[in-house]
Amino acid sequence: MIIQTEKLTKRYFHKNGEIYALKDISLSIDKGSFATITGPSGAGKTTLLLALGGLIRPSSGKILFGSTPLHDASDNKLASFRLNNIGFVMQNFALIPYLTAAENIMTPLSLQGKPKDMQRHAAISLLEEVGLSDRADHLPRELSSGQQQRVAIARALVNNPSVLLADEPTGNLDPSLSEEILNLLARLNREKGITVILVTHSRLAESFGTKKIRIKNGSIES
């Protein structure tokens, strides 16, 4: 087991009362699994994903990464945890527009203070792995949507994370590109043993899951 939550709850205060984004979520995700999180809009899918990645704090409950508690960790510990354990892939790619594909991938290693030649070597290796070895020095605007998402995935992998968190990674792609990206994630999951946790509205994406989590109104559907 790599991630476990116990009665995970996130609530916000509104003038009309409390709003529960998550309510008593208890789940476990095994190491090396491909987990999908599905549900209607506003169900709490992205909130759950961000909580699992240590990007938002729960109002109550526990989040354990292995034996490491995230729910009460300091901001500095959470930042270090994310940098060394988690890769993030977003729907809008979130590439830095004035950096090349290789430079975008190098960014997490730069934050870790790694030598420049090591950063570049790692970026080129990952571009080869995602089939973009000839696009290293291209800016995001010079890449197709599918290529930009491949660069984003490579960037998420550069710190050798044990978990890859993906929020609607195919949401801006057409069906053929969506399947291409999903097959890439599935291959990385299978060959590298990286745990993938993917939020999606797509039935195709959900079909890739070895563990399926469905939530509605902030709670897991039984």
Image (cartoon, grey):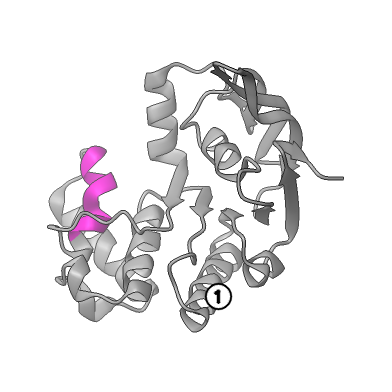
Q: Position of residue 64 (x, y in %)?
A: 64, 29
Taking the spot 22% from the left edge, 65% from the top edge, the residue there is 101
Furthest residue in direction bottom, as rendered: 176
Of the 4 image quadrants, the one containing the C terminus is: top right
Q: Considering only vertical position in the picture, is 212 above or below 76?
A: below
Depth check: give the residue in front, 103 or 220: 220
Range drawn in magenta: 103-112
Taking the spot 21% from the left edge, 67% from the top edge, the residue there is 140
Q: Which residue is mark 1?
A: 183
Depth check: give the residue in front, 27 or 163: 27
Identify residue type, mark 1: Asn
Q: Position of residue 202 (x, y in %)?
A: 62, 66
Q: Is residue 50 left or right of residue 112?
A: right
Furthest residue in direction front, as rendered: 16
Quarter residue 8 falls in: top right
Depth check: give the residue in front, 51 or 163: 51
Crowding at label 1, few (<14), some or many (≥20) Cα neighbours within 10 Å?
some
Q: Is residue 5 left or right of residue 117?
A: right
